[in-house]
Every structure is written in structure tokens, then in C-alpha cells.
Amino acid sequence: MAFGLYVHWPYCESKCPYCDFNSHVANAIDSERWVKAYQNEIERVARSCPDEILSTIFIGGGTPSLMKPEIVEAVLGAATSAWRTTNDLEITMEANPGSVDAARFRSYASAGVNRVSLGIQSLDDTHLRLLGRKHGRDEALAAIEIAQNTFSRVNIDLIYARQNQTIDAWYAELSEAISLGTGHMSLYQLTIEDGTVFAQRHKAGHLRGLPGDDSAADMFELTQSLCAAAGLPAYEVSNHARPGEECRHNMIYWQAGRYAGVGPGAHGRIQLDKRRIATEAIRDPGQWLRAVEEVGNGEHPETSLTSEDQITETLLMGLRINEGLPLAQLEKAGLALNDWQSRLDLIAEGYLEADDDRLKTTASGRLLLNSVIGCLLQDLKTTQS
Ligand SMILES: C[S@@+](CC[C@H](N)C(=O)[O-])C[C@H]1O[C@@H](n2cnc3c(N)ncnc32)[C@H](O)[C@@H]1O
Ligand code: SF4
């Protein structure tokens, strides 16, 4: 089974008003401290699962393209010394168009990065301003070109269902984005996350012009059909790829596989003896650094996942991807399939399908994914209690 490493870089140039990721703005960053802390944490985590064979590394953030190339090199050096690796190790790095330049990208590529994920968000200057982005359309287009000239695999992130966005405007914007020719696109509906500036504005009635549920659902369906027609079908609710260009690292999450997480707030799922262990690092960057330096460990105490936790995670993740999840994985985690009536009801209603011993959402199930999962989990609570 594939094993991945997630490394979190928690800094950005500015905080976007919609974003609730663990990202912070800092005046000064001491690269040497970060290098040592990442190296120590990677070595510490690897001691608990030394026999894994690393097949993916994902450097996410925050804005990892603000990392000095020496830090990236040190992180990748530590990871590839700590574990054996597959021959086709996928190494992804997230980048923000405002911090992309060709020389910097070439340094990341020489350090081993072979896939880049660009936070484009929109190709329209007015909407980029509404999203509080520091970059404009021209910078976005230039960054995509530089990325395509440097890396063989490139993803772009776009956010839709934005303020005052019509379906025709999304059709035009998405068509242009597809024409740029990247092999992967992550297309997210704008979510108003608690604790963000957008949430405050929304509560105060100042975030006007957001599409209603019906328009957002129309935009989702348009997204599915346009991308599929262009040869980038969805393989997950928000992720589209040319066949073979799927993000292998994220597939590990969706298949409820094993991965280590290093850096502030990073999560991991590792195997210790027969137990599946959840790890979570300290979220605040300063506190994480101090914990690594002073106690030699940047994580909260680890927890063993119960059978119910594992079933819940397997469902939450596996029903997001087109291939679905093997029913045997649920049985292995302790689920008595025969007692699970809501599964049969949802299959009969056309929201789920079961074939080849896998459970999958149908297109209409994916449109109502949260309700479908809610219904399955509710039923599990009653059958397992
Ligand atoms: C961790 S960010 C990394 C990318 C990079 N920091 C940037 O913004 O350019 C990953 C992606 O999540 C998406 N995202 C973040 N907050 C979102 C929200 N509230 N609604 C929808 N998508 C969101 C954006 O598309 C973003 O590019
Ligand atoms: S969206 Fe990206 S650049 Fe903006 S605050 Fe979040 S992580 Fe940073």
C-alpha cells in the first residue's frame, strides 16, 4: 500500500479573507531553525514507521513557494534518507502566483519537486480583488506558463460560486482555464468558513451576491460536464485530471491509506503494530518550533483510532472519489454490512451504487454528498450502539 509524507509550511504573504488553513503572516523567518526542526521531526516520525516505502511527498501550506530552496532541499533530503522510496516518487509543492519566478521554480525542480499546484483562484482581475488576492490575471497566466515549462505535472486551483458570478461567466472562465492545458484542475465551490473575514462579513450581511444553492449546483454540474468533455473527468468531488495525472498523494487520503504529517498542524495516519494511529502536530508555528527544539517532539499525544473512527473515516474519504471504496475495507474495520439498512435504501434511491464489491456515490449522490454521508453515519451510530 502507498505511503505518503505531508509537510506543512505555515506562512503566507497575506491572509486571504476566505481561508481557514493554518497560515500566518510573519515579519521574519529563521530558515536555519525551520530546516533543523523539519529534519528532526521527519527523523523522529520515521523511527516509528521505518519500514514504509515512501511514494509521495506533498509540501502544502500556507504558501510553500515562499520557502527558500535550501529549506525544500533539506526537507526532501531528510525524507528520502529516512525512508526507502518508490522509483516514481511524486513530490508536489503548492505555489502562489505572486511568489513564482522561473529561477526559483528551477531550484525546486533540482531539489526533486516534480509536480506543482498553483493557487490561481480566478482569471478575472475584479474577482481576484474580491477574493483579496495579491496577484492579478497576468501574473496568474505567467505563473502557469513558468510552471508548465518547469514541471511535467501541473495543477491549478480555481474557486467558483463567488460573489456576483453568473453561470455564463463561469463557463467562459473555466473554458479559458481548460484551454491552458494543465493535466489537473482542483475546482472548489467557495465555502464560507467559520472564523474567517468572509464569515464575519457574511454574518453582517456584507457579502452580497453569493449564488443560492440551485445556482451553485448548476455551476457544479457545468464544471463536471465541461471538464469531462475536455478529457479531464472528475475523479473526486472537486478534482479533475487527465487519466494518469491524478494526485497520488491525495488519493492516499481518500483511500484511507497511511501517511506521516510533519510541520505545524499537520495530521498523520500511521500503523503501529496492528493499531491505526492518528497524529496531530501543534498548530501554532512558534509553539511547534519550540516544542521540537525543547522536547524533541512537535506533536500532541497520539491517539489510536477505534473501529468506529476508522469506519467513519473510510466512508468520509472513500465516497468522495469516483472509484468508491472496497466494502471489504469496512468489514475489516469491524462493520457488519447486513445491519446497514441505509446503504440499501440509498442504493435503491439512486444515490449510491455497489459494484465489484465497492460502494460508490452516483452523480446525484455526489451532488448531495454531505447528506448521503450524514445518513450513512447516523444509521451506523444506531446499529453500533
Ligand atoms: C492551502 S491553499 C494553498 C494554495 C496557495 N496558498 C494559494 O492560495 O495560492 C489550497 C486551496 O484551497 C482552496 N481554498 C481555500 N479556502 C477556500 C474556501 N474557503 N473555499 C473554497 N476553496 C478554498 C483554494 O483554491 C486554495 O488554492
Ligand atoms: S488561500 Fe493560500 S495564500 Fe491565501 S491565506 Fe490561504 S494558504 Fe495563504
Image (cartoon, grey):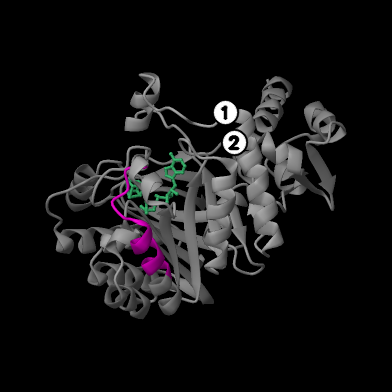
Q: Is residue 299 above or below residue 198?
A: below
Residue 71 x %, y %: 25, 67
Q: Amino acid at mark 2?
A: Ala
Quarter in which the C terminus is drawn: top right
Residue at 37% in and 77% down: 109
Is 171 situated left or right of 336 in this image? left
Q: Is residue 140 magenta?
A: yes
Q: How many residues crowd mark 2 within 10 Å: few (<14), some (14–19), many (20+)?
A: many
Distance from Cα at disc 1 to Cα at disc 2: 6 Å
Residue at 33% in and 73% down: 105
State the image quarter where residue 132 is shown: top left
Q: Is residue 27 magenta?
A: no
* Foreground pick, 249 / 179: 179
Label 1 sits on residue: 212
Label 2 sits on residue: 216
Contact between labelled residues 2 and 1, with CB atoms less than 8 Å apart:
yes
Secondary structure of the residue carrying numbered label 2: helix
Q: Which residues are magenta?
A: 131-144
Residue at 12% in and 54% down: 28
Residue 171 x %, y %: 59, 50
Residue 310, label in figure: none
Residue 311 visible: no
Q: Is residue 193 above or below residue 285?
A: above
* Foreground pick, 77 / 275: 77
